[in-house]
Amino acid sequence: MSKTELVSVTARLPAEDIAGIPRGSLSAFIRDAIAEKRAQTRPANPKPRSRLGKLLLAARAEYLAAGGKPLSWAEVRTEVARRRGGVLLPRRRLGTSVGGAAGGCPA
């Protein structure tokens, strides 16, 4: 019998995809990993690390202070389409690249 090399694989799946898998199909390790990931919390006020991030956060704070309201992703897409003359871009998941090439621009 030959030795088999084991390789670790990580997959990022939407929670609704995992919810549809019967519990008996997932190993205890996977169930524990999903529960641990869901238990993690993000900081309420993340601090930007880059100069651009700081400028964007300051612009957002100024907009909110002037009475602006945060928009949902659907509202952002509609506003961008309106400014582009009604052209609505296709929806893409965050983290995918344009053209599908490695190293492409994030969507």
Image (cartoon, rainbow, N blue to C red):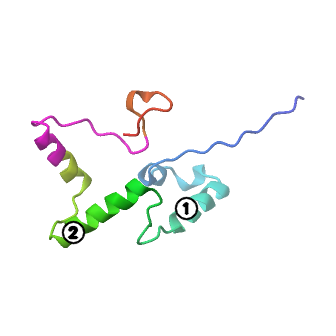
Picture disc at residue 86: none
Residue 14 spot, x, y in % from top left: 44, 50
Please state, as top left, top right, bottom left or bottom right, where the C terminus lies in the image: top left
Q: Residue at x 39, y 45 (%)?
A: 94
Which one is in front, 18 or 82? 82
Give the dominant element type of the magenta stretch: helix, strand or loop: loop
Q: Which residue is mark 2?
A: 64
Residue 8 placement, left or right of 71: right
Judged from the image, the secondary structure of the residue bearing numbered disc 1 is: helix
Which one is in front, 49 or 9? 49
Q: Residue at x 23, y 67 (%)?
A: 62
Q: Which residues are magenta?
A: 78-95
Residue 65 placement, left or right of 104: left
- Mark 1 nearby-residue class (10 Å; few <14, some 14–19, many ≥20): few
- Mark 2 nearby-residue class (10 Å; few <14, some 14–19, many ≥20): few
Residue 22 spot, x, y in % from top left: 52, 52
In this rendering, the answer to whether 86 lies above or below 35 is: above
Q: Which residue is mark 1?
A: 37
Q: Residue at x 44, y 32 (%)?
A: 104
